[in-house]
Amino acid sequence: EATEQKIIPNRQLPNIQAGLNARFLLHIRLAGFSQAYAISREVVVPGNTILSKLHDRVLCPAFGWTRGFHEHLFSLPRSAYAENRRPLDAQTDIVFGPVRSQFSILSQCGFHKVLRDTDMVRVNEANVCIADLLQHPEHQLYYVLGASDGWKHIITLKDVLPCDSEAGVALADGHGVC
């Protein structure tokens, strides 16, 4: 809860405030495939899209995954934190997921060293939006889908676009079949 408590006040920072009122062009790539066989999508979403909706209403439909069926988690790569700005400490990862999920799939997917419950803090994804985590082009977020298969995705912020009050979510591009 302490980590979640830090996220909400940060929304007053100018770069996060601007992101909450913008649209984000995201490039989502399924990891583990060579460029020749790349599976990716580009979507435009409001910056204030919460992670639970990003999973259920954007990523699952864009890739053809069944909505509401797969376990999932989001995680920031450790490189996202400046050495003196890590939210907790150098040995603790922060993952974002549903509160009902009881397991760690990140350690199965090779993003980090083997994780134990003491090595991570789980934050309720319903309280975190994209603008809280991605502020500048090339910032990345990991998305892992499925407890047994562990499909790894790398979400990269490609561009921050002006807000269009009429615009919602849009699929901008895609390559490969899932």
Image (tube, rainbow, N blue to C red):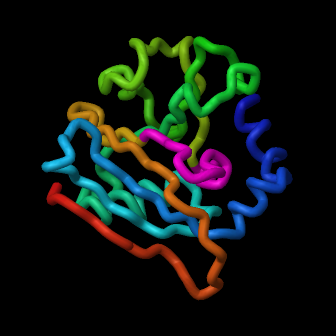
The answer to which quarter of the image holds residue 27 is: bottom left
Q: Residue at x 59, y 87 (%)?
A: 166
The answer to which quarter of the image holds residue 172 is: bottom left
Query: Which quadrant would the C terminus be assigned to in this image?
Result: bottom left
Q: Is residue 79 above or below residue 31?
A: above
The answer to which quarter of the image holds residue 109 is: top left
Q: Nearer the viewer, residue 36 or 116?
A: 36
Residue 131: image x %, image y %? 65, 54
Q: Is residue 119 magenta?
A: no
Q: Nearer the viewer, residue 38 or 167?
A: 38
Residue 10: image x %, image y %? 80, 45
Q: Residue at x 47, y 74 (%)?
A: 169
Task: Report the side of 107 relative to 24 (left or right).
Answer: left
Q: Is residue 176 above or below residue 94?
A: below
Q: Which residues are magenta?
A: 126-142
What is the tally of numbered marks visible in this picture? Answer: 0
- Can residue 23 be seen here? The reply is yes
Q: Residue at x 23, y 31 (%)?
A: 148
Query: Which quadrant would the N terminus be assigned to in this image?
Result: top right
Q: Nearer the viewer, residue 89 or 66?
A: 89
Task: Report the side of 14 relative to 102 (left or right).
Answer: right
